Image (spheres, helix red, strand yellow):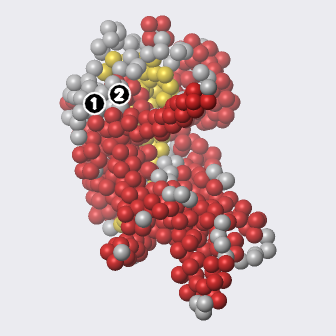
Amino acid sequence: MTANRLTRRAALSAGAAAALATVGAPAILHAQTATLKITTWGGKWGEIMKGELLPAFEKEFKCTVSADQAFPFVPKLQASPKSNPVYDVLHTNSNEQWNSLDLGVVEAKLDHKKIPNIADVYPYAISDKIVGVSIFTSAIGLGYRTDKGLKKPTSWKDLADPALAGMRGGYIIPVNSLGQCHLMMLGKIYGKGFTDLDAAYKALEALKPIKLVDFTGQMEKMLLAGEVSMGIIHDSGVLRYEGQNQPVDFAIPSEGVMALEQVLNVTPGSKVKELAYAYIDYMLRPDVQKRLSETVWYSPSNKKVKLDPKYDAKLFNTEAKVAQLIQPDWKWYNARKEEIDTRVTRLLKG
Amino acid sequence: MSARSIDAGRMAYYVLNGAIITFLLTPIAIVAVFALNPTPYISFPPVGITGRWFAKFFATDDFMISLWLSLRVAVVVLLLSMVIGGACALALARGRLPGARVLTAFFMSPLMLPAILTGLALFQVFQLAELDRPVWGLIVGHTLVAVPYVLRTTLAVLANFDTRVEEAAASLGASPLRVFFEVTLPLIRPGVIAGGIFAFIVSFDQFPISLFLVPPKGETLPVVLFNYMKFDLDGAIAAASMVSILLALSVVLLLERVIGLKAYVKL
């Protein structure tokens, strides 16, 4: 009984200690240093950012970087006061930047004078299809198994091969930008152009039965596990397994690949705009670009980046290669997203 | 005829229980299989046995930091929920408050609102107050949805509470404080503790509220797992799930050992 009482007391004391430690410990004192609030990805990208690149930036610019890896970024930005936004720099794919522009939570146009490295980017990185600046891109094409007797796909139409019934992979279009890109591509291939939705819907329905996933990571694993023999995926999702003896490869269809850009933009209400611009410029530096490119297999936007041969051979890092990239018109797509979501959900039901 | 119907009834009882147990335990078994499968992707059937995913889980700083934070937050939420939920239940059941039923419904309302909206609303409040995202804000959010569990279980105990026991203690000269600590509290303890365990689990597994309230570099385990899944869907996720399940089980067993939970199973 006595032992029981002592144990209970010890347990309560431990609980109280944990309470104090939990409430008190994370009260990080930022002292007088400026804090730059950004969003960033997780996975390997996050490891390099948190482990190397952000500490180096903090040291050079004598600041603290608060990097949020927890989605969803845009709703959080939208819910915070515009005069004191939760982020200073928003990192998302291109479609979300267009959404953010509509919501008025990112700048319509970046001040290029404050980003010297922007002078060295490929035109696609600052084209009229981009809000902000694209610091990297992936190419959306076709991933396929090399051990299933399939010929390397040469066209987007190869995904419709009847032999792939039930073994082809796509995305839940309302929640995945790769699926949305593919829908636009179907309009171009089977209809009058990227905006030919009727042709796209018809072609999409012809792909049934098709396995659908939410995230690109799931598509990667379905390809690796052999649950699908061919699927829509970005090149980095396949190239990252290079040298690991996996029977998967990436194919660039002759009609072109869609660009999946990694875009940075500044929030209008940021109180540390100079630092925000400095961060964007830092992310465009050739050494920073090379480090990230060779970690996550993203194609760098800066033309001056010299990649090691194995990356140089595969990534989109020359004028000729980037010419194959097709940039989706997200402004057009987002304006119709609700209608498209309803239609494709009905089409792919079951 | 009678014996046959009893046998049939017993058989149905066993079949039904077996089905329920299978239904509850199959997901855990599948997670265990994935956690031990050596392939770098989740696949079935397994091709071997490995401990590499557990090694990866324990060697990854993000997982360890978030696991420790989740545990600490859940302990604090457990304590706060027991105090707040227990006190509210006593006030509602015994305080002769006007509109007690309405107040009960009000306190239970966080369970009726989608948690993601609660998270978004709290996030907005903290932002407007320029508090950013403090860890105590996360604790407030978790406590908000955990208190109703303690409230409900304690009210259930209080519904069958014989107030004559308290009256007897008072008539024998015990002060109101002594009556509370030596009579009332021990009697309502089963409800408070049972609710506290729910509160711990609700907090430890909490995702929708945490999604909005976790600070940068201060993500809880469910949020870290969600983000990890978007980029690396490998066996480490299954290993993390196994560790979470074992930890939750350990807490229940620890409480049983320390507080004697077995005595309250009848609740």
Residue B96's quadrant in the figure?
bottom right
Question: In the image, residue A155 lies at what x, y percent?
Answer: 43, 13
In the displayed structure, B87 sits above or below B155; it is below
Q: Nearer the viewer, residue A262 or B264?
A: B264
As shown in the figure, which amino acid type bears the numbered disc 1? Thr
Q: Residue at coordinates 61% horizontally, 30% vertically from top-left?
A: B2
As shown in the figure, which amino acid type bears the numbered disc 2? Ser
Q: Residue at coordinates 27% horizontally, 41% vertically from top-left?
A: B53
CA–CA distance in space, label 1 to label 2: 7 Å
In the displayed structure, A226 sits above or below A37; it is above
Secondary structure found at label 1:
loop
Q: Nearer the viewer, residue A238 or B165?
A: B165
* Disc number for residue B39: 1
Instruction: Report the chain holding disc 1.
Output: B
Local crowd size for mark 2, using a 10 Å CA cut-off: few (<14), some (14–19), many (≥20) = many
Q: Are marks 1 and 2 in contact (CB under 8 Å)?
A: yes
Q: Which residue is mark 2?
A: B43
Q: Residue at coordinates 24% horizontally, 33% vertically from top-left?
A: B49
Q: Nearer the viewer, residue B167 or A91?
A: B167
Secondary structure found at label 2:
loop
